[in-house]
Amino acid sequence: METIKNLELTPGLLDYIAQWKDKPGNLIMILHKAQEEYGFIPRNVAFKLAEVLDVPLAKIYGVITFYHYFKLEKRGKNIIAVCMGTACYLKGGEDIIKELETILGVGLNDMTPDGKFSVEAVRCLGCCGLAPVMSINGTVYGKLLKSQLPEILSKY
Amino acid sequence: MPYKHYILICSGTACESSRSREIHDHFMKEIKDHQLENDVQVVKTGCFGFCEQGPIVKVLPDNAFYVRLKPEDVREIIEENIIKGRMVKRLLYNPKDDKGRHPMTDVANIDFYQKQFRIVLRNCGVIDPEKIDEYIARDGYKALEKVLFEMTPDQVIEEVTKSGLRGRGGAGFPTGMKWSFTKKAPSDIKYIVCNADEGDPGAYMDRSTLEGDPHSILEAMTIAGYAVNANKGFIYIRAEYPLAIERLNIAIAQARDYGLLGENLLGSSFSFDIEIRLGAGAFVCGEETALLASLEGERGMPRPRPPFPAVKGLWGKPTVINNVETWANIPVIILRGAAWFAKIGTEKSKGTKVFALTGKINNSGLIEVPMGTTLREIIFDIGGGIKDGKQFKAAQTGGPSGGVIPAQFLDTPIDYDNLIAIGSMMGSGGMIVMDEDDCIVDITKFYLQFSVDESCGKCAPCRIGGYQLLHLLEKITNGNGSMDHLDKLSRISQAMQKASLCGLGQTASNPVLSTMKYFTEEYTEHIQNHKCRAHKCSHLLKFDILIEKCIKCGLCAKACPVGAISGDREKGYLIDHTKCIKCGLCFERCKFKAITRG
Ligand SMILES: Cc1cc2nc3c(=O)[nH]c(=O)nc-3n(C[C@H](O)[C@H](O)[C@H](O)COP(=O)(O)O)c2cc1C
Ligand code: SF4
Ligand code: FES
């Protein structure tokens, strides 16, 4: 476990932990910060957190795996989140995923070989009036047509 | 000095996605270029609700309502409307109807707003949510002042009880009663929680309220803190709502600066503070006991009730949990009085309800109507009817826990009890409109898939029952259904209702029961005739070439990805059904409608 001993958490995460350490129920907030810093929750970071926070590793993994938001795998540089909420489903959200698959060659929860894009499904981005909707790195694209995808992707 | 003009720009997530930020920047630049800084104020507001028409800009005092703006349009609005006082007709909202009306020069005449009544959304689209002074200017924090200095905690609870307010998070529990349980529970530490997890896919009422009027939630939670003697509040909000989180953070910081959160509020002896905690994408965490587990930093597993959180909640302490929309009603009830509030709505459902109106509807957006408004008024008057002149099939309320409302109930007044009586439920306020192109079995399968994915797995009826329901629905949509599956569906559904631990499992079968009741023949059609009238269930489709219409161009054969179409330009073409994967590409490609889809 040498790698974990020597692992230095990012300063941003360390600051955050210092702020939250004594607050009860802080684990989820700290995991959010970790994911913000690393893009996902790497194994050695989870080990390190167990040590720093003094909680069992099993609990950390228990929480990570319960919540869809936390990811254990490396994700692409740009994260495409296609809405699969009800409004978007009715208006063809599935076609958007299929079209992305055709264009990028990877399906849901997968990353392009060059690491540029990951495709994920989310439940309702809260812009149902604009269905179908997807977001790339948080920027929302609404009233999507399949034909607009190549142009949108080319911006990244 | 007051400004001569105010330009209100919608800055909700939906409008921001359609470039309202750029539009804002253009306005700032044009105002500077024309040296109008002292005459015009630009305000970034919350959602106007009419998301279909976004991005939207309103100019006051003219009341001009500009829709679907592009950044390029900004200069014209400045030069014409602001400088010359002439509205830019081509950019005004222009209802596409046959009543021969002209572009609307007054917001008050727009159908979308006419039957609406705004309590919860009173400040959305009116104030800049990032400025506490604007909230205060609209009587903000006055209700807090009133309770702190003129009312006893018991009087506050009595006022809320008398108003008849019921929880807007789904179950409709009387809010005043909930507070009184917590008040009576003996404990020196108590908590107030705002449920902003908004998990129903297809609903965004809470998001818009938080984005457009965050202070109203802070004020309401503080009032509840005073009423039940709690000093600490938590807002549990979905991580998927970054803009709402940002605005809440700003609002909390401002309220602390103004002495409206923290120690000795407004110089009184009462102290209260609020913290934000993020959810992490688990629908079940909207359920109150799971939410508390998640707030405690655990896996979000529901706990058996009783004990109810009102008595034994966060870290075992008495806790009031209410939904965002419930909270937003509180300051108004305190200021205008329970009697005023109780006049709105129906006998047992008081006040208004916010709905996220989406799906196959012309004016999709966020609406607020008095309880007791009929579905017909919502869909046809406010919503402007079904898209592309299609036939209304059903509206779905209550999300994965709810059911469908078919056309025969269009005139039923919508309130908690009526919706339950017809097999749906109010839910949090998602209202999804379906038309003839939507397959009822397919939608039901969609909801079941959702509940199966989101089941926490703690209890067997939900974990196994949900999966079995989904499996049966899959058989039916794949063409492998049999009539006795219908009976199985309803027996499993009833077992889940009775035996599941939490609301998720207890209600997950509602979509099944409700659609089987009102659309029995669609189920039988799928099973007996292998037919999906909406052409959604691809396994049941059969493509054929109509010889009379076919001009033997061969495009279909080229389009087919699996080579299921054989023939040549002499003899014509034929589809081999054993090879066909029912992708429908040939159907889309044929320009002569020579391919039939059955
Ligand atoms: C599976 C499930 C999901 C729920 N999701 C939400 C939600 O997203 N937002 C919410 O306010 N209430 C939700 N509820 C209802 C809460 O359990 C609780 O009744 C509500 O927060 C109480 O507040 P109210 O009385 O103001 O409605 C959910 C309930 C269940 C069973
Ligand atoms: S009903 Fe479902 S979600 Fe609720 S506790 Fe049981 S398994 Fe978990
Ligand atoms: S259903 Fe897609 S944004 Fe709500």
Image: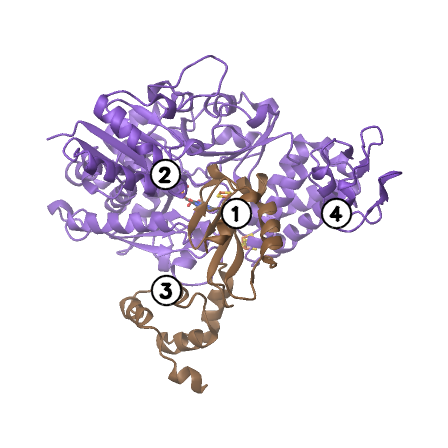
Chain colours: A brown, B purple
Residue depth check, mark 4 versus mark 2: number of the one nearer the observer: 4
Which residue is the site of mark 3? A33
Residue depth check, mark 4 versus mark 1: number of the one nearer the observer: 4
- Identify the image quadrant of residue B61: top left
* Mark 4 secondary-structure assignment: helix
Seen as rendered, the residue at the extreme top is: B100
Please state which amino acid type lies under the numbered disc 4: Lys
Return the x and y of residue A75 as percentages of the image width and height.
49, 64
Seen as rendered, the residue at the extreme front is: B570
Which residue is the site of mark 2? B326
Seen at 39% across and 33% down, the residue is: B49
Gap between marks 3 and 4 measured at Cα: 43 Å
Gap between marks 3 and 2 measured at Cα: 30 Å
N-terminal-most mark, 4 or 1: 4
Residue depth check, mark 1 versus mark 3: number of the one nearer the observer: 3
Return the x and y of residue B116 as percentages of the image width and height.
39, 24
Which residue is the site of mark 4? B475
Which residue is the site of mark 1? B503
Please state which amino acid type lies under the numbered disc 3: Lys
Seen at 49% across and 49% down, the residue is: A152
* Mark 1 secondary-structure assignment: helix
In the rendered image, the vertical position of residue A54 relative to residue B105, given as above or below: below
Seen at 31% across and 24% down, the residue is: B64
Which residue is more in the foreground, A127 or B586? B586
* Mark 2 secondary-structure assignment: helix
In the image, is the residue at mark 2 within 8 Å of ligand 1 by its beta carbon? yes
Please state which amino acid type lies under the numbered disc 1: Gly
Side (left or right) of B560 relative to B27: right
